Amino acid sequence: MTYNVDSDFIERYKSFLSSDEFSVSNTEVVKSDYWKFHAEAVNIDIIGNAIILDGKSGFYHSQISLKKDPLGYIKSRIARAVKDPTALKKYLARKFGLKKQNNMDFKKALDLVMNHDPLSDPDLSTYRINFLRMQDKDGIFKSYAEMERDYQREFKKDPNFHVVKSYYYYNILQYLTDLKNKQRIVEIGGGNGNLFSLLHKKIQGAQIIDIDLPETLAHAIPFIANTFPDAKILMPHEVKSMDFEIGDYDFIFMVPEQIKLLKKNSVDLVVNTHSFQEMTQQQIAKYFAMSYDILKKGGHFFVVNRVEKIPCNNCFKVESDIPPNRFCEYPWDNNNKILAYEICKYDRLARAFDNVYLRLDEIR
C-alpha cells in the first residue's frame, strides 16, 4: 500500500521509525513465534511524501471502489496483478469456479446471519445474540447492501471480508452496549485499523487507542492519517503520559511496553479480535490484567478469537512445543456479566476453516 501524506507527518513518522518505541518490542514475551516471523516480513519505504508498505499478516485493506472511482479501481487492480501475479491467478480461479471453495461468499453469509436464516444456525435463546431483535435497534446495518453503501460513502472503497466483519462486530456492540457513549476505546492488535476507523466514524468524539507491535503500527498510522487527514494523531514516541483530555487526540498509538501509562478506570470499551490467538500465553494474561484494570465499571470487554490456535509460524512443517491458546482458557473474570458468548456465526459461514468464539462482557 502507498500513502501520500504531508511533509510534517513524514518527519514525525521517521522519528517514530528511529525511536526506542519502534525498536524495543523484540522480547520473547512480546512477540510470539508467529509474530517474530511476520514482523520481519514488514517492509517500509519512504519516497518524498509517499509511504510504501508491505507485509504478510494483519493488513487487510479494501480496494478503491469501482462505483466511486472506476479509473482508480482499474489502476489498483493492474498494479496488484503486476506486483503479485499469483493473486491474479487465485482471483480468476475463484471468479470462474476453477478452485473449490471451503467457504460461502462473505456478502451472502452476512445476510443469512442478519436475517436469522436457518443456515446460520440461529437460536432464540437468552444465551445467544438475537439477530431478529437486533434489526429493530437504531444504527444497525441490516444487510450487506446497507454496509456497502455506507462504506462506499464514508471511505470511497468497496468493503472486503475483513471490513464487513468490522461492521458485523459494530452491529453487535451497537445492539448490546451504549456504544454512542463510549468515549475512550482501546483496541489491542488493531492491524491496519479497519474496526477502529469504523468506530471513529460512527462514535462522535471518541478517542481511539491502538496497542500493537511497532511493525504493525507502522502500517496503521499512515493508513489512519491518509483516511482521516484532519485527525489528531499521537504516535508512540510522542506518548509520554495520558495526562490529556479525550478531545485532545482522536487516535493514540502505543506499543505494548507503554500500556503501563494507561490509567485505571479510564476506558469504556476494550476490543481484541483475532490477535490474542497469535500471542504468547504470558502476553494474553498481561493484556487481560490490563483490560480489567483500565475498564470502568459498566464498561465492556469484547473478544473474538479462534477456539484454539498454536501461535507458531511453521507448525505444519516442524513439530512445535508451543502450547495452544484456547479461548475458554483465557483468564476471564467470571464475576463480570456475560452479554454474549457464542461461536461467531458470520465467521463460521464466511471463513469455514476454524471455529471462532465471540464474547462480550460487562464489567462489574
Image (cartoon, rainbow, N blue to C red):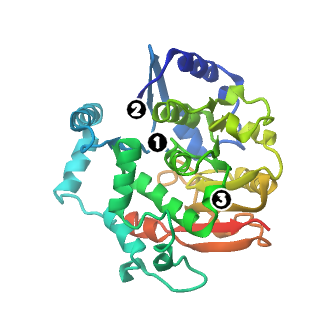
Residue 323 is marked as 3
Residue 318's x, y, as percent? 52, 51
Residue 129 appears in which quarter of the rendering?
A: bottom right
Instruction: Judge left or right: residue 190 versus residue 293.
Output: left
Choose the circle earlier in sequence order: 1 or 2. 2
What is the quadrant of residue 148 in the picture?
bottom left
Residue 89 vs residue 170: left or right? left
Q: Which residue is mark 2?
A: 1
Tell which tag, 3 or 1, sits nearer the viewer.
1
Disc 1: which residue: 59
Disc 2 residue type (three-letter):
Met
Query: What is the secondary structure assignment of the residue under circle 1?
Result: loop
Q: Position of residue 66 (x, y in %)?
A: 24, 43
- Identity of the residue drawn at 46% across and 58% down: 167
Q: Is residue 340 visible?
A: yes
Which residue is nearer to you in this view: 95 or 152? 152
11 shown above or below 152: above
